Image: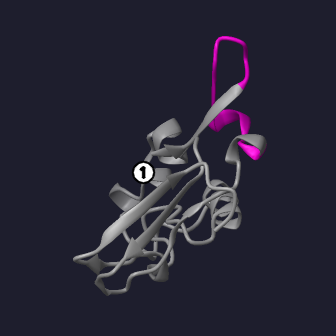
Amino acid sequence: DGYNLPIAIAPRRGSGKCTYAGCISDLNLNCPPSLQVKNEQGCVMACKSACFAFSTPQYCCTGSYGSPQSCRPTSFSRLFKNACPRAYSYAYDDPSSLVTCSGADYLITFCPHQQ
């Protein structure tokens, strides 16, 4: 769980809900200190998810937080959702962020300049 590289995923031909997915925002620029992964020089090179960073039921939507009613967005998931609105930011995020596209080819672009 996390993010460190802008990516675009565009389905080509297929059936179902075939929509663009991806994010071009540089989340490392606004990554909270508690989620940062730094290199040997101290530069932020990745931003972990809160679940990966803290491994607690509250952030991983497990245990007593294992339902849409009890696992709500956090400041961390909101930060990611604001930067990447089409991405799924936590276990019970907006269902419209989930897509199923059958029989498609995909064009995957690393470090796209725009959508």
> How many tags in the picture?
1
Q: Please give the name of the residue rendered at 77% of the width and 42% of the height, measured from the top-left corner.
A: 29
Q: Name which residue lies at 62% across and 60% down.
A: 74
- The verdict on residue 74 being magenta is no
Task: Return the residue found at the far left.
Answer: 103
Front-most of residues 83 and 71: 83
Q: Was residue 32 drawn as part of the magenta stretch in this picture?
A: yes
Q: Residue 33's spot in the image, x, y percent? A: 72, 34
Q: Residue 3: percent from the left, percent from the top? A: 55, 45
Q: Which quadrant of the figure contains the C terminus?
A: bottom right
Circle 1 SS class: helix
Judged from this view, the residue extending furthest toward the right is 29
Does 26 sit above or below residue 73?
A: above
Crowd class of label 1 (few under 14; some 14 to 19; many from 20; radius 10 Å):
some
The kind of residue tagged 1 is: Pro
Q: x%, y% of residue 1?
A: 45, 45
Residues rendered magenta in the picture: 30-43
Q: Nearer the viewer, residue 41 or 8?
A: 8
Task: Report which quarter residue 15 is drawn in.
Answer: bottom left
Q: Nearer the viewer, residue 91 or 64?
A: 91
Q: From the viewer's perspective, is 9 left or right of 28?
A: left
Residue drawn at x 64%, y 30% is 45
* Residue for badge 1: 57
Image spot of residue 76 (x, y percent)? 64, 54
